[in-house]
Amino acid sequence: MARLLSACNAVSYLFFSGVAVLLIERLGRRCLMMISTFGQFFCFLVISILLCFSESSTEREKYASASVAFFFLYYGAFGIGMLGIPWLYPTEINSLPMRTKGAAVATAMDWITNFVIVEITPIGIQSLRWKFWLVWTATNAAFLPILYFFYPETANRSLEDMDAYYRSNPSLIVTKDPDAICRKRPQKYIDHEASVIEKTAAGLNYPSDGMVSHVEQLEAEADKE
């Protein structure tokens, strides 16, 4: 039964991980991470309650079986957001000089925390039993306001847009700036890009209403020389 449940869980995990690909640009990184984190928080909370009842109630199997369903739901919530976005977000959120360093630190932290969780989980379950799941309930609940107040949106933005965002000396609380949390690309970045293209095209004697590719720019400069 354990192998069968693990196999079914892996299949559902794969499905929800694929759903994330369809949602990540539509909902944005912030929204999907908050949905995922809230889903994890809710599942851990219900799991804690059900396992608590399973220890004190005469209908132990009933509550224990119900908790299995929420383990399935947890992996669904994890798969649609916090599984993949923490690998993507560090490469998008950092400025150009810090991009590789930031991604390296994020990857290292991901693997270190995974290692710690794998090591402490058997000990935690043996020592705390159902109370062990309250630890993850609390950590997910604590992370929700962190995501909401401190994580800017990176969906539908170029890497240059994020550089421009940091050069504007933004507030640490991202909710103060609507452009920092909107899913659509802010108009100021679109206008700036159009202005740069127009100036570049004008300097190379190209029509200002078209985008000049990098190769065409080099060819035009070579012709001038």
Image: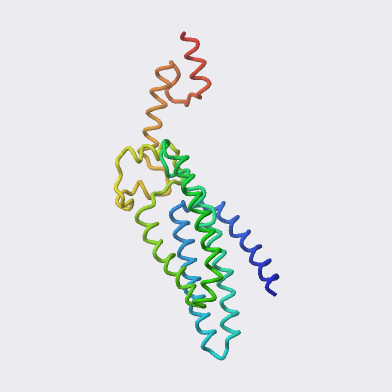
Residue in the foreground of this view, choosing between 155 and 115:
115
Judge whether 58 appears above or below 24 on screen.
Answer: below
* Image location of residue 64, percent across then percent down: 58, 80
Q: Is residue 132 left or right of residue 174?
A: right
* Image location of residue 178, percent across then percent down: 33, 49
> Quick one: which residue is furthest to the bottom in this view?
58
Residue at 29 percent across and 41 percent down: it is 169
Residue in the foreground of this view, choosing between 50 and 221:
50
Q: Is residue 96 left or right of residue 77?
A: left
Residue in the foreground of this view, choosing between 32 and 140:
140
* Image location of residue 73, percent across then percent down: 56, 68
Residue at 52 percent across and 75 percent down: it is 47
Way the structure is coloured: rainbow
Residue at 58 percent across and 56 percent down: it is 19
Judge whether 194 appears above or below 178 on screen.
Answer: above
> Quick one: which residue is furthest to the top in this view?
225
Q: How many numbered discs?
A: 0
* Image location of residue 209, percent across then percent down: 44, 25
Quadrant location of the N terminus in the rendered image? bottom right
